[in-house]
């Protein structure tokens, strides 16, 4: 009837306006069949009902995911050479020797702490079956909470003790915490009940809090950004008072560069922790698979020999974390 005729006329007018705008934008006489179909898809046919956007469509219409990914991962390195990209993830060992040593220590620490990845299997395969261990996932969550609370309790007072009573020295506390962490991993091999494992996790969690506090402090203490221009700048300021303003501006620019260098070094320091926490479970998983697949009980995933390999290897990583700090050259840290 008349309603259908009016709808068809409105539809034709809309398509005409759309194609006209496309011609204006592209300076083309004919936009082709693709644009005609595009117009129909955007405007709809007379018989189509208005399309209701789903939540997913609304999300992607607001957030252009491909553009966001390009901006995050491609644009920052678009004009960088391979050597510049490599330098962003490397520490100059000659200039920042002590900070490099602290970074290596951090890497070994996260290799060692990754043994917690296998707690779920250890509880299932080794601990006595009780109500506490009936659900291994809940048991692991309880261990994590206990360990985090213990670490939160020790980290603050250890920092105060280090600053006020040990003259800002950090290494003795790192040595002690690594010893406790190694002892905690070895103690796990003698646990037969969940209660015993709770006590070991509390002990190891307190040592974790001590290590992380001192590790961050060591990174700051050994982070030295120096400049070859410092002495020449002072000399020029002494020669002429007319250059004070100019040298002040240069000093400000230099300080900005220093902060950029510190941020880059701390970024590498953090990345090494991620690498350790990622590679530790890979190596530990291989050890557990190779050493723990023999003499299995019917209900076991892995045998006790496999867990011995994992936890002893973790204790060795903590030992390496402590020993590596002996190569720090700076005194009094």
Image: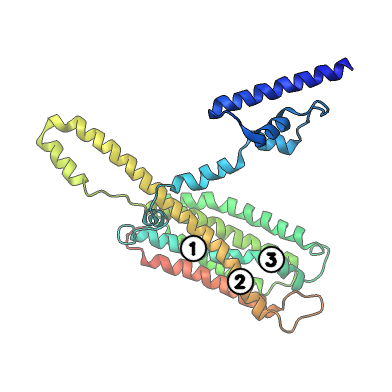
The image quadrant that residue 93 belongs to is bottom left
Eye-nearest disc, 1 or 3? 1
Q: How is the image coloured?
A: rainbow
Residue behind mark 3: 119
Residue behind mark 1: 107
Q: Is residue 190 visible?
A: yes
Real-space Cα separation, disc 2 to disc 3, in angstroms = 12 Å
Callout 2 crowding tier (Cα within 10 Å): few <14, some 14–19, many ≥20: many
- Seen from the viewer's position, the closer of residues 134 and 4 is 4
Q: Residue furthest left?
A: 239
- x and y percent of residue 305 in the render? 67, 80
Real-space Cα separation, disc 1 to disc 2, in angstroms = 15 Å
Element class at badge 1: helix
Q: Residue at x 62, y 74 (%)?
A: 286
Mark closest to the chain's N terminus, 2 or 3: 3
Mark closest to the chain's N terminus, 1 or 3: 1
Report the side of 40 relative to 129 (left or right): left
Residue behind mark 2: 284
Q: Is residue 214 visible?
A: no
- x and y percent of residue 318 in the render? 52, 68
Q: Residue at x 61, y 62 (%)?
A: 203
- Seen from the viewer's position, the closer of residues 247 and 222 is 247
**Compared to 128, does 333 lie above or below?**
above
Query: Are dots 1 and 3 in contact, CB under 8 Å?
Result: no
> Image quadrant for the C terminus?
bottom left
Real-space Cα separation, disc 1 to disc 3, in angstroms = 21 Å
């Amino acid at each position: 009837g008349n309603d259908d005729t009016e709808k068809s006329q409105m539809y034709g007018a809309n398509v005409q306006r759309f194609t006209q705008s496309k011609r204006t934008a592209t300076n083309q006489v004919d936009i082709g069949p693709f644009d005609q179909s595009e117009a129909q898809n955007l405007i709809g046919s007379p018989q189509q009902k208005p399309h209701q956007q789903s939540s997913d469509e609304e999300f992607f219409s607001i957030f252009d995911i491909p553009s966001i990914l390009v901006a995050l991962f491609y644009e920052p390195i678009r004009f960088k050479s391979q050597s510049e990209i490599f330098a962003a993830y490397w520490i100059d060992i000659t200039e920042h020797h002590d900070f490099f040593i602290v970074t290596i220590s951090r890497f070994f620490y996260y290799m060692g702490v990754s043994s917690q990845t296998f707690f779920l299997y250890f509880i299932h395969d080794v601990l006595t079956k009780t109500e506490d261990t009936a659900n291994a996932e809940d048991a692991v969550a309880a261990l994590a909470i206990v360990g985090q609370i213990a670490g939160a309790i020790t980290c603050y007072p250890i920092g105060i003790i280090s600053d006020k009573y040990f003259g800002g020295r950090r290494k003795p506390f790192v040595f002690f915490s690594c010893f406790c962490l190694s002892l905690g991993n070895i103690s796990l091999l003698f646990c037969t009940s969940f209660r015993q494992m709770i006590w070991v996790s509390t002990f190891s969690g307190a040592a974790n809090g001590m290590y992380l506090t001192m590790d961050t402090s060591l990174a700051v203490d050994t982070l030295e950004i120096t400049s070859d221009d410092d002495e020449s700048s002072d000399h020029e300021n002494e020669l002429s008072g007319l250059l004070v303003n100019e040298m002040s501006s240069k000093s400000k620019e230099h300080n900005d560069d220093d902060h950029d260098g510190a941020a880059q070094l701390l970024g590498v320091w953090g990345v090494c922790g991620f690498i350790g926490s990622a590679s530790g479970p890979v190596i530990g998983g291989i050890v557990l698979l190779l050493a723990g697949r023999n003499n299995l009980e019917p209900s076991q995933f892995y045998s006790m020999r496999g867990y011995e390999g994992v936890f002893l290897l973790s204790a060795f990583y903590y030992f390496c974390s402590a020993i590596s700090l002996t190569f720090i050259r700076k005194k009094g840290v």
